[in-house]
Image (cartoon, rainbow, N blue to C red):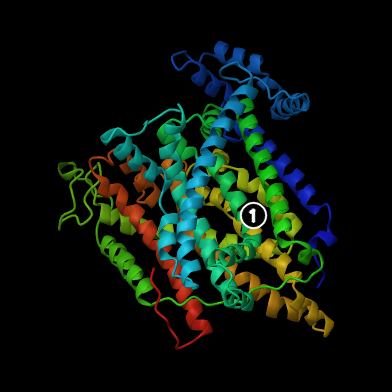
Amino acid sequence: MRLPARRLWPGTAGTTRSLSLLAVVAAVGLLPWLSGRDPALSVLRARSAEQEPTREALDAIRRDLGLDAGPLSLLGGWAAGLVRGDLGISWVSGTDVGPSVLAGLQVSLALMGAAFGVAVLLGVALVAPVLVRGRASAGAGAAMLAAVPEFLLATVGLLVCGVWLGWLPTSGWDGPSSMVLPAVALGVPAGGLLGRLVADALPAVLEERWVELWRGAGVRRARVSAAALRRVLPPLVPQFGMAAVGLTGGAVAVETVFAVPGIGRTALGAAKSQDLPLLQGAVLALLLLGLVTGALSALVRRRLLGPALRDASLSLPPPLPVRVHPAIPLTLAALLATAIGWGLLRDPYAVNTAVRLAPPSWAHPLGTDGLGRDVLARLGHGAASTVGTAAAVCLLSLVLSLALGFLPGVAAGAADIANALPPVIVGILVAAVAGPGTGGAAFAVALISWPPLAAHAAALVQEVRASGFLTAQRAIGAPPSWILTRHVLPTVAAPVARHALLRLPGIALALASLGFLGLGAQPPAPEWGLLLDESRAYVERAPWAALSPAIALALLAGLAVSGAAYAQGVARTPGKEAPVGV
């Protein structure tokens, strides 16, 4: 086996970034033609909804925009202008695209900073108990926080803090107070995810010999904790960078709820109206942000690792199983199975307007929705499509990330581009070709769900290959296949698999977000994302209709993480179980 990946293909990452960037920009440039809709008609509707779409009016728009020349000519003209620093003229408003993109990016970056601050504070709160106790928890609580639907949290925060209490603005962008509710809605799930990743890696470090020696020498707890955090952060630094980029471009649903003029909402509006220059400018800004953030993350990671990475003298913490009381996953599984099983016995499509928005009762244990349909029935019948689709996408992402982990240059280059794409934009591109639906939404989420896992795997592979232990294995003549199957792959696969399970509810949420924006499952399908979307309009009057699928997603997250931790602990130390709280 050869070390490290950067010696094999020095220009691979740059080449992959360039090719991925060109592919995405080209796909966006072809959107009006991929959709099968007349772009002139879309632009006419966006400019003036009352004007009749006569042949003369449409021909005038085609001549004005140069649509008759075809997509390649338009894309070439846009690229030529880009070289001169010109992002083009909006097809709808007739103004320069550059100022609009810059304004939206500034708003989104400010919102990202606030949301990332919330995420870090929540992550610190989740990591602190691990530092104090020196052992990991089941992780169910953090996983449940990571599974909170951002748009539902945004809607509830808007109603409670904005409408009922009147503490904060409910829409627009006017000063720091306007970013509080959106930042909390975005930061809570991100904080649960990042906090759990750090908390999952800390216990093995805290069991190392140096920690015991430092404590015996009287080193302050704060200094030991800081050193332990520094030790676990290198493979996780790319995750923080990707989370920041995701908070910038992936906040479309939250920006829509609060009418925030961010770059994600700008891109969504441009895609819907097929304002191609504005859409290309917004997507390009997000891609460049992803590339810059990826480069900074790689630099920070190299600085944290120091010369040990270059000299192949890293020492990795030994894997440490998490002790989880079996009652935790069993309780979560029982609750989820009971709700789904009970719901499967009911009719999810029966409409009864006489009992619309009815509260929970024995006849309707989770109440009814706006059409009088049983929420429990729709929850149960939607579990297969929601959970099954999310699990399939998660498994595909895990397999792909493990494969790309052994090609760090390819993984880093493509991941920076794919991670910067908002799910809704990818969903629009896929829906333009295949139409809206569960299959198209799953394919769209699969295209962008693998970068965090691939970045995690690539970082671990690079560190394992640079470890002193593997150097010793090669020195004694161990064959590459033995090293790969007995040391590298097991060391990498376990933490990445736990990371994938932590991402499972996030994938379900991405599917739900596309359903929320009309790009996923279509009515009357009882898909959980569609349930959230349908109930959002009357969440103040009938919160049970929205909270039920949200709680189901949280239970799924807690079950996935705590069940995996329990299974790993039993596999490593059979017969020895030490109860640990959530």
Using the image as rendered, state which of residue 10 and residue 392 is in the foreground: 10
Using the image as rendered, state which of residue 410 and residue 296 is in the foreground: 296
Where's the C terminus, which quadrant? bottom left
> Is residue 2 found left or right of 554 in the rendered image?
right
Q: Position of residue 388 (x, y in %)?
A: 45, 61
Quarter residue 208 falls in: bottom right
> Is residue 377 found left or right of 52 in the rendered image?
left
Residue at 74% from the left image edge and 55% from the top image edge = 410
Where's the N terminus, which quadrant? bottom right
Residue at 48% from the left image edge and 71% from the top image edge = 136
> Is residue 501 found left or right of 20 in the rendered image?
left
Which residue, as the protein is rendered here, is positioned at the far bottom? 575
Using the image as rendered, state which of residue 327 and residue 234 is in the foreground: 234
| Pointer 1 residue | 238
Which residue, as the protein is rendered here, is positioned at the far front? 218
- Reply above or below: 351 against 34: below
Residue at 29% from the left image edge and 63% from the top image edge = 339
Residue at 44% from the left image edge and 50% from the top image edge = 188
Q: Is residue 552 visible?
A: yes
Q: Position of residue 143 (x, y in %)?
A: 44, 60
Using the image as rendered, state which of residue 163 and residue 218 is in the foreground: 218
Q: Position of residue 559 (x, y in %)?
A: 41, 67
- Reply above or below: 52 against 276: above
Q: Amino acid at mark 1?
A: Pro
Q: Position of residue 65 (x, y in %)?
A: 65, 18
- Reply above or below: 514 against 553: above
